[in-house]
Structures are given as C-alpha cells and as structure tokens.
Image: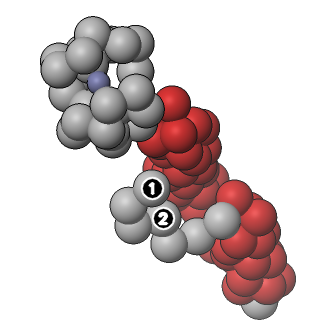
Amino acid sequence: MDNVEYTCEELQELVKKAEREVQELMNKMTPEEREQAALKTQKLIEEDRIAMQKLIDDAQQAMAGSAPAEKEAPKFCASCGAPAGTGKFCEYCGQPL
Ligand SMILES: [Zn+2]
C-alpha cells in the first residue's frame, strides 16, 4: 500500500466528470466539429479508462496482497522470542512460526 492517491470511487467519479465536460464542449460545436472531436475524445477516453483500470487493479491488488500477509508473518518466535527469519520455522528453537 504505497502511494494510492485515489479510491476506486474517486477514480470513477473523475472519469464521469471528464465525460460530462466533453459532453458540454461538444454541445457548443458544429456537427462537423463534433464528429471530429468525438472520434478524438473517444480514443482519449478509451486510453484513460485503460490507465485508470490499471490503477484500480493495482490498488486492489496492493490492498488484497499486503494487509493479510503482514499478519501471517510474525516478527518474533512465539516460543522462544528470537527474531523470526525468512523460513517457516524458528532458527533457534525449531518451533513453527
Ligand atoms: Zn524459537
């Protein structure tokens, strides 16, 4: 869970807001301009969506991955109190960590 700046809801809100702004701009254009702009913005929105989806996926993965793992890995042996190594058993007394 390092630098997650937005929640999923906030990201979706940003996408909606961007789409609304585009819609407002397009209402002021001529039909020809609108058609050109629609093609361009469609592409941009599509690219934004992919980037945002990646952010959302990364954030969800970070939340799902890091939190429980820390609880499952004790820092000290429960049996003798020695610092826990990287293995599944205590290096000092052999008890499972
Ligand atoms: Zn131990």
From the viewer's perspective, is 3 left or right of 29?
Answer: left
Is the residue marked 1 within 8 Å of ligand 1, measured from its CB? no
Q: Which residue occupies the foreground of this view, 17 or 41?
A: 17
Quadrant of the rendered structure where residue 60 is? Answer: top right
Q: What residue do we see at 22% from left, 38% from top?
A: 83
Q: Are marks 1 and 2 in contact (CB under 8 Å)?
A: yes
At label 2, counting other C-alpha atoms closer than 10 Å, the crowd grade (few under 14, some 14-19, many 20 or more) is: few
Q: Position of residue 35 (x, y in %)?
A: 68, 61
**Closer to us: mark 1 or mark 2?**
1
Which element carries disc 2, helix, strand or loop? Answer: loop
At label 1, counting other C-alpha atoms closer than 10 Å, the crowd grade (few under 14, some 14-19, many 20 or more) is: few
Is the residue marked 2 within 8 Å of ligand 1, measured from its CB? no
Quadrant of the rendered structure where residue 13 is? Answer: bottom right
Q: Give the residue pinned by disc 1.
A: 1
Quadrant of the rendered structure where residue 78 is? Answer: top left
From the viewer's perspective, is 90 left or right of 42?
Answer: left
Q: Give the residue pinned by disc 2.
A: 4
Q: Position of residue 5 (x, y in %)?
A: 50, 72
In this rendering, is residue 24 above or below 67? Answer: below
In this rendering, is residue 30 above or below 12? Answer: below
C-alpha gap between disc 1 and disc 2: 7 Å
